Image (spheres, rainbow, N blue to C red):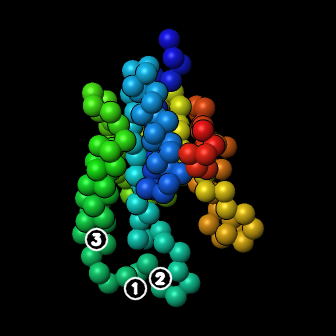
């Protein structure tokens, strides 16, 4: 029996994250694994800005985030349809929050056996400024985490 019966596959729609989806798709087809495809929208309230305080945001953040979530669901459905073979139906999930934390929360709530995710391989200043979602997930996940930078890594 394949040890990963339930796989969480976060995506940001980058090439590397789509490679993670392809890998999860192959596991699902070959071994009957369940796949959860997750997209996390960073909350407008959590976006770093040295010039704007959260209280100064005057537009309707709830409506804006709802619209972004609907667009993400549509994109997830389109991407999943193009990657997953007929007969493999991934569960699609969209959340709003901090990406690493939402990935970890989803993994725990869904009791997944593994996380397949991309790492963008940022170094230097970009790594310092943006950090690494994959790094935070790897260091705190309660299950194995497989990371890929591109389909060339497979």
Q: Hey, which residue is sitting farthest bottom in the picture? A: 51
Closest to the camera, between mark 1 and mark 3, is 3
10 Å crowding of disc 3: few (<14), some (14-19), many (20+): few
Report the front residue among 85 and 91: 85
State the CA–CA distance, disc 2 to disc 1. Answer: 5 Å
In 3D space, how far apart are the residues under numbered discs 1 and 3 (Cα atoms)? 16 Å
Can residue 85 be seen in the rendering of this structure?
yes
| Mark 2 surroundings: few (<14), some (14-19) or many (≥20) residues within 10 A | few
**Residue 66 figure quarter:** bottom left
Please provide percent x and percent y for residue 99: 50, 55
User: Which residue is tagged 1?
Assistant: 56
Regarding residue 134, the answer to whether it shows in the image is: no
Q: Residue at x 75, y 68 (%)?
A: 124
Q: Secondary structure at mark 1?
A: helix
- Which residue position holds label 2? 53
Q: Secondary structure at mark 3?
A: helix
Can you tell which mark lies on residue 64? 3
Q: Earlier in the sequence, mark 2 or mark 3?
A: 2
């Amino acid at each position: 029996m394949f040890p990963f019966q339930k796989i969480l596959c976060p995506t940001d729609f980058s090439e590397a994250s789509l490679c993670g989806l392809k890998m999860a798709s192959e596991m699902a087809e070959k071994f009957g694994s369940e796949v959860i495809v997750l997209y996390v929208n960073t909350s407008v309230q959590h976006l770093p800005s040295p010039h704007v305080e959260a209280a100064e945001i005057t537009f309707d953040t709830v409506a804006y985030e709802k619209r972004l979530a609907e667009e993400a669901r549509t994109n997830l459905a389109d991407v999943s349809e193009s990657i997953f073979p007929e007969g493999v139906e991934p569960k699609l999930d969209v959340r709003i929050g901090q990406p690493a934390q939402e990935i970890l929360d989803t993994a725990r709530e869904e009791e997944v056996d593994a996380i397949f995710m991309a790492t963008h391989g940022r170094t230097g200043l970009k790594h310092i400024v943006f950090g690494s979602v994959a790094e935070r997930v790897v260091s705190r996940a309660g299950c194995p985490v497989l990371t890929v930078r591109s389909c060339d890594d497979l």
